Amino acid sequence: MKVALAQVQFRLGDFNNNYRELLSALEKTKGKADILVFPEGGLWGYPPQDFLYQKEFFKTQEKKIKQLFKHLPSSLTLDIPGFNMEYEQLKNGVFLIEKNKKARFFAKEFLPDQSVFFESRYFQKGKAAENFFYWKNKKIQVLVCEDFWKFSQLKKTDFLIVVNASPYTTEKQKTRLKRLKELAKKTKCGAVYLNLVGAQDSLIFDGASFVLNEKAEKVWQGKSFEPDFAILDFPLKKKSPLAKKSLNVIEQKEQALILGVKEFFYQTGFSKACLGLSGGIDSALVAYLAIKALGKQNLKAYFLPSPYTEKVSFKIVKSLSKNLDLTVHQKDITKLLRFCLNDFFKGSLSGLTQQNLQARLRMLFLMAQANETASLLLSTGNKSELAMGYCTLYGDLAGALCPIADLLKTEVYDMARFINRKNHIFPKALFLREPSAELAYKQKDSDELPPYSDLDGFLKKFLKDKNAGKGIESELSQKIQTQEFKRKQAPLLLKLTERDFGEAWRKPVAHRFYPGPV
């Protein structure tokens, strides 16, 4: 039995492009395979969320599936995920399409409502035990994403197909492989794990599909963060060559962020970005990622010094612009700041308000440039700052997308160091200087926050076990909870971890619960 695996990139609502992806895979498969499998999402893309309330989407899907029948050879079976509306009940699952036969639909049974998915809001349950078909007397079981994790009644089968739209997180691939090995050992059959590749808002789909043989050994590995295609002959007599060497965790995060930025701009219809460079590590890394995703010709960078900007920041920005081969436009905000403080506010602003005013004046300029050049503004805050509210509303928190908002400050440094091993991009001074917002004379982040190594250690623990802790940890946890109003107004972030500050973080803004030491 020859199985074709199409690890394709389906974009949400882009029916024409998604249909072309299906046809392209079909052409590669004709005369070479018996079954062609696609990842979850199919013609729609994933996740569609409230688009599922719009009936015209289902009409378009039905039209495209009918068109596929015209191109389907009699010897090929297609496994295409999609959404089926029957008897006013909407279900998520897989269409099984064969020439001259009525399409069958296998509905997903277990509907995820944890983290970023809310499928019970839209879908009715199917029965995973009924989701199988026969090919030349071989029983082929189909599991759709969450069924793969929770379906425990898997009986004797000859082959297992698992289709997914599984978002990337740093530890996800290990758990996927562990789970499929458990099922493969249980059934003693070959198994395919096929995953979507691409990005949708905060979610990044890494692909990284893989195949196990009858001994639960990994015999094929798909590419990460890019489309891939393979035809494998089962039962596998020997290992196929791995498609690509596995990426380490930092490489994964780097590739994930580049893909996330690239897809966000493409799907929103923008090609150009702008950002403010400060002379700090965060904005430097975002500039690098933006260039990798969009090209240096599509990024405009601005350096907006104030009276408190240190000389080292000027040197770093100059060196960084040379290393990136990027023109950086410099606009000093000193005169504008003095006008606001002395003439507009008549010297009535306190120290913290003055600091925030600088951040907001910079955003006044940056947002105007974004509007004027039909660009999207990239925010440059990290996860540590977002956790502690160490950011200014309508200032440095402004933007359409914050690529590194799920990277802790120490992880930002780690990624920059890793990138420098491949190509020297980030000046040495970036790693030597003490972090500072430079909104006051000789200001340091450590004036307001614990050292980032200590803070990030706490945040990793806090975000994992959600307990308040004791002493200073209790104070930090209270600080986190009082800053929710800022996180609710922050730009969209790119998800890298299970516990990000996006949709996976559901905390109220207004409350009176501030736990003390336990």
Image (cartoon, rainbow, N blue to C red):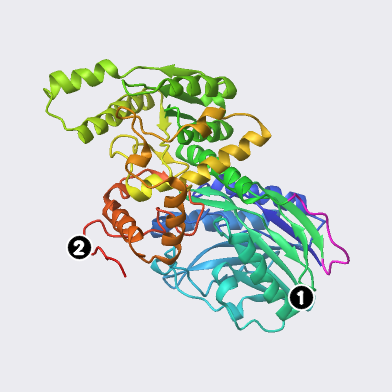
Q: Position of residue 260 (x, y in %)?
A: 52, 44
Magenta span dominant secondary structure:
loop
Q: Position of residue 505 (x, y in %)?
A: 38, 58
Q: Is residue 225 left or right of residue 48?
A: right
Q: Residue at x 53, y 56 (%)?
A: 61
Q: Which mark is residue 512?
A: 2
Q: Is residue 450 left or right of residue 203?
A: left
Tell me the quarter of the image containing the N terminus. bottom right
Q: Residue at x 29, y 27 (%)?
A: 364
Question: SS at mark 2?
Answer: loop
The front one of 137 and 495 is: 495
Q: Would residue 75 be seen by someone viewing this image from the given angle?
A: no
User: Which stretch is magenta?
Assistant: 234-245
Residue 125, placed above or below residue 432: below
Local packing at callout 1 (Cα closer than 10 Å; few below 14, some 14-19, many 20+) is many
Q: Is residue 241 magenta?
A: yes
**Cβ–Cβ under 8 Å for marks 2 and 1:** no
Residue 371, placed above or below residue 129: above
Amino acid marked by disc 2: Arg
Q: Position of residue 229 (x, y in %)?
A: 73, 52
Question: SS at mark 1?
Answer: loop
Q: Residue at x 49, y 59 (%)?
A: 498
Q: Quadrant of residue 39?
A: bottom right
The front one of 59 and 54 is: 54
Measured Cα–Cα span from mark 2 to mark 1: 55 Å
Q: How many marks?
A: 2
Q: Would residue 252 be seen by someone viewing this image from the given angle?
A: yes
Amino acid marked by disc 1: Cys
Residue identified by numbered label 1: 189
Q: Is residue 305 magenta?
A: no
Q: Is residue 289 left or right of residue 382?
A: right
